[in-house]
Amino acid sequence: MGQARLRRLRGEMPRPRPRLPERDRFSSVGDVVKQPALWAQLPDPVQALVPSLMQRYLELNKTWPNGPACGGPLFIHEDGRYECKAGCPGELAVLHVPEALQFCTFADRYEHSLPELSCSWCDHQRDEAHEQLVICPGMATEHDDAAQECDLGAACQAPDGLHSFTKSCGLFTPCARC
Protein backbone atom coordinates (compact mmCIF):
# COMPACT_ATOMS: atom_id res chain seq x y z
CA MET A 1 0.00 0.00 0.00
CA GLY A 2 1.34 3.44 -0.95
CA GLN A 3 2.44 5.95 1.70
CA ALA A 4 -0.09 8.54 0.50
CA ARG A 5 -2.95 6.06 0.81
CA LEU A 6 -1.83 5.03 4.33
CA ARG A 7 -1.68 8.69 5.37
CA ARG A 8 -5.14 9.26 3.91
CA LEU A 9 -6.57 6.25 5.79
CA ARG A 10 -5.08 7.54 9.05
CA GLY A 11 -6.76 10.89 8.42
CA GLU A 12 -3.49 12.76 7.91
CA MET A 13 -4.37 13.74 4.35
CA PRO A 14 -7.72 14.71 2.87
CA ARG A 15 -9.23 12.31 0.38
CA PRO A 16 -8.79 13.66 -3.14
CA ARG A 17 -11.93 14.85 -4.88
CA PRO A 18 -12.83 12.69 -7.85
CA ARG A 19 -12.39 14.47 -11.16
CA LEU A 20 -15.51 15.35 -13.08
CA PRO A 21 -16.37 13.19 -16.10
CA GLU A 22 -14.79 14.50 -19.32
CA ARG A 23 -18.11 15.87 -20.64
CA ASP A 24 -18.58 17.96 -17.47
CA ARG A 25 -15.09 19.46 -17.29
CA PHE A 26 -14.63 23.01 -18.43
CA SER A 27 -11.61 25.25 -18.88
CA SER A 28 -12.13 28.57 -20.60
CA VAL A 29 -8.37 28.64 -21.22
CA GLY A 30 -8.35 25.11 -22.67
CA ASP A 31 -11.24 25.94 -24.98
CA VAL A 32 -9.41 28.97 -26.40
CA VAL A 33 -6.11 27.10 -26.78
CA LYS A 34 -7.89 24.60 -29.05
CA GLN A 35 -9.17 27.38 -31.34
CA PRO A 36 -6.35 29.19 -33.18
CA ALA A 37 -8.60 32.06 -34.30
CA LEU A 38 -9.58 32.83 -30.69
CA TRP A 39 -6.03 32.30 -29.42
CA ALA A 40 -4.74 34.92 -31.89
CA GLN A 41 -7.13 37.49 -30.40
CA LEU A 42 -5.69 37.20 -26.88
CA PRO A 43 -3.36 39.95 -25.64
CA ASP A 44 0.37 39.21 -25.88
CA PRO A 45 0.87 38.88 -22.08
CA VAL A 46 -1.77 36.13 -21.95
CA GLN A 47 -0.31 34.36 -25.01
CA ALA A 48 3.06 34.35 -23.23
CA LEU A 49 1.68 33.28 -19.83
CA VAL A 50 -0.53 30.31 -20.76
CA PRO A 51 2.22 28.20 -22.40
CA SER A 52 4.62 28.93 -19.54
CA LEU A 53 2.01 27.83 -16.95
CA MET A 54 1.27 24.69 -18.93
CA GLN A 55 4.99 23.91 -19.23
CA ARG A 56 5.44 24.41 -15.48
CA TYR A 57 2.55 22.04 -14.69
CA LEU A 58 3.87 19.42 -17.11
CA GLU A 59 7.27 19.62 -15.37
CA LEU A 60 5.65 19.32 -11.93
CA ASN A 61 3.64 16.32 -13.07
CA LYS A 62 6.77 14.68 -14.48
CA THR A 63 9.04 15.32 -11.48
CA TRP A 64 6.39 14.90 -8.76
CA PRO A 65 3.67 12.63 -10.24
CA ASN A 66 2.04 11.88 -6.87
CA GLY A 67 2.35 15.42 -5.57
CA PRO A 68 -0.59 17.62 -4.63
CA ALA A 69 -2.83 19.06 -7.31
CA CYS A 70 -5.12 22.06 -7.05
CA GLY A 71 -8.52 22.27 -8.70
CA GLY A 72 -8.52 26.05 -8.70
CA PRO A 73 -9.96 28.19 -10.04
CA LEU A 74 -6.75 29.82 -11.18
CA PHE A 75 -7.79 33.06 -12.87
CA ILE A 76 -5.76 34.53 -15.73
CA HIS A 77 -6.09 38.27 -16.28
CA GLU A 78 -5.83 40.31 -19.48
CA ASP A 79 -2.46 41.78 -18.47
CA GLY A 80 -0.85 38.38 -17.82
CA ARG A 81 -1.26 38.36 -14.03
CA TYR A 82 -2.80 35.29 -12.42
CA GLU A 83 -4.18 34.20 -9.07
CA CYS A 84 -5.48 30.98 -7.54
CA LYS A 85 -8.56 31.27 -5.34
CA ALA A 86 -8.41 27.76 -3.84
CA GLY A 87 -5.96 28.51 -1.05
CA CYS A 88 -3.23 26.21 -2.40
CA PRO A 89 0.47 26.73 -1.53
CA GLY A 90 0.96 28.79 -4.67
CA GLU A 91 0.15 29.06 -8.35
CA LEU A 92 3.55 27.68 -9.34
CA ALA A 93 4.16 25.50 -6.28
CA VAL A 94 1.65 22.76 -7.10
CA LEU A 95 0.16 21.23 -10.19
CA HIS A 96 -3.14 22.77 -11.29
CA VAL A 97 -5.46 20.41 -13.14
CA PRO A 98 -6.42 21.57 -16.65
CA GLU A 99 -9.96 22.58 -15.68
CA ALA A 100 -8.53 24.86 -12.96
CA LEU A 101 -7.30 27.36 -15.57
CA GLN A 102 -9.97 29.97 -16.20
CA PHE A 103 -10.00 33.46 -17.62
CA CYS A 104 -11.06 35.96 -14.96
CA THR A 105 -14.19 36.77 -16.98
CA PHE A 106 -15.59 33.46 -15.69
CA ALA A 107 -15.05 34.33 -12.00
CA ASP A 108 -18.74 34.80 -11.39
CA ARG A 109 -19.30 31.08 -11.98
CA TYR A 110 -17.38 30.27 -8.81
CA GLU A 111 -18.87 31.01 -5.40
CA HIS A 112 -16.77 33.31 -3.23
CA SER A 113 -14.09 33.58 -5.90
CA LEU A 114 -14.17 37.19 -7.06
CA PRO A 115 -10.63 37.96 -8.16
CA GLU A 116 -8.58 40.22 -5.89
CA LEU A 117 -6.69 41.54 -8.89
CA SER A 118 -8.66 43.31 -11.57
CA CYS A 119 -8.39 44.09 -15.24
CA SER A 120 -10.72 45.27 -18.01
CA TRP A 121 -11.89 41.65 -18.46
CA CYS A 122 -13.23 41.25 -14.93
CA ASP A 123 -13.87 44.80 -13.66
CA HIS A 124 -17.48 44.51 -14.83
CA GLN A 125 -18.08 41.90 -12.11
CA ARG A 126 -17.74 44.62 -9.49
CA ASP A 127 -20.40 46.72 -11.23
CA GLU A 128 -24.06 46.62 -10.16
CA ALA A 129 -25.12 46.29 -13.81
CA HIS A 130 -23.33 42.92 -13.92
CA GLU A 131 -26.07 41.47 -11.72
CA GLN A 132 -28.58 42.29 -14.45
CA LEU A 133 -26.62 40.41 -17.12
CA VAL A 134 -28.62 37.52 -18.59
CA ILE A 135 -26.74 34.24 -18.80
CA CYS A 136 -28.60 31.27 -20.27
CA PRO A 137 -28.34 28.13 -18.09
CA GLY A 138 -28.12 25.91 -21.19
CA MET A 139 -25.18 24.41 -23.09
CA ALA A 140 -24.16 26.39 -26.17
CA THR A 141 -22.49 24.51 -29.00
CA GLU A 142 -20.18 26.63 -31.14
CA HIS A 143 -20.03 25.32 -34.69
CA ASP A 144 -17.17 25.58 -37.19
CA ASP A 145 -18.97 28.44 -39.00
CA ALA A 146 -19.11 30.42 -35.69
CA ALA A 147 -22.86 29.82 -35.31
CA GLN A 148 -24.03 29.16 -31.77
CA GLU A 149 -26.77 26.68 -30.90
CA CYS A 150 -28.28 26.22 -27.41
CA ASP A 151 -29.47 22.83 -26.18
CA LEU A 152 -32.56 24.53 -24.70
CA GLY A 153 -33.80 25.42 -28.18
CA ALA A 154 -36.61 28.01 -28.10
CA ALA A 155 -36.29 28.23 -24.29
CA CYS A 156 -32.78 29.75 -24.59
CA GLN A 157 -32.59 32.86 -22.40
CA ALA A 158 -29.72 34.51 -24.32
CA PRO A 159 -29.87 33.50 -28.01
CA ASP A 160 -26.88 35.66 -28.99
CA GLY A 161 -25.39 36.02 -25.54
CA LEU A 162 -23.59 34.26 -22.74
CA HIS A 163 -24.28 30.66 -21.69
CA SER A 164 -23.38 28.82 -18.51
CA PHE A 165 -21.67 26.11 -20.54
CA THR A 166 -20.08 26.17 -23.98
CA LYS A 167 -18.52 23.46 -26.09
CA SER A 168 -17.02 23.20 -29.56
CA CYS A 169 -18.86 20.85 -31.90
CA GLY A 170 -15.81 19.51 -33.71
CA LEU A 171 -13.57 18.75 -30.74
CA PHE A 172 -13.17 15.07 -31.66
CA THR A 173 -15.34 14.66 -34.76
CA PRO A 174 -17.44 17.23 -36.60
CA CYS A 175 -21.16 17.26 -35.87
CA ALA A 176 -23.71 16.32 -38.55
CA ARG A 177 -24.43 20.00 -39.22
CA CYS A 178 -20.79 20.88 -39.92
Image (spheres, rainbow, N blue to C red):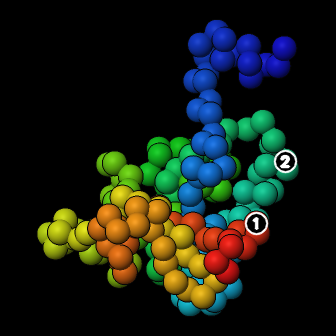
Q: Quadrant of residue 168?
A: bottom right
Residue 134 rendering spot, x and y as whole percentages: 26, 69
Side of 60 where 29 appears, left or right: left
Report the residue that reaches farthest toward the top.
10
Q: Secondary structure at mark 1?
A: loop
Regarding residue 50, the answer to whether it shows in the image is no
Query: Where does label 1 land, which residue?
Result: 172
Q: Residues within 10 Å of mark 1 (few under 14, many from 20)?
A: few
Residue 54 rendering spot, x and y as whole percentages: 71, 64
Residue 157 rendering spot, x and y as whole percentages: 29, 68
**Mark 1: amino acid:** Phe
Report the residue that reaches farthest toward the left.
128
Residue 173 rendering spot, x and y as whole percentages: 76, 69
Kindly report which numbered mark, 1 or 2, lies closer to the viewer in this rendering. Answer: 1
Q: Quadrant of residue 136?
A: bottom left
Check the image and report above or below for 73 versus 128.
Answer: above
Judge by depth and name the residue closer to the eye, 158 or 19.
Answer: 158
Q: Residues within 10 Å of mark 2 (few under 14, many from 20)?
A: few
Side of 38 where 155 appears, left or right: left
Identify the residue shown where x is 62% and y is 30%: 16
Identify the residue shown where x is 35% and y is 76%: 159
**Mark 2: amino acid:** Thr
Q: Marks 1/2: CA distance? A: 30 Å
Judge by depth and name the residue closer to the eye, 59 or 123.
Answer: 123
Query: Where does label 2 land, which residue?
Result: 63
Identify the residue shown where x is 73% and y is 38%: 67
Judge by depth and name the residue closer to the eye, 58 or 145.
Answer: 145
Quarter occupied by the N terminus? top right
Q: Secondary structure at mark 2?
A: helix
| Comes first in the chain, label 1 or label 2 | 2
- Residue 77 — which label? none
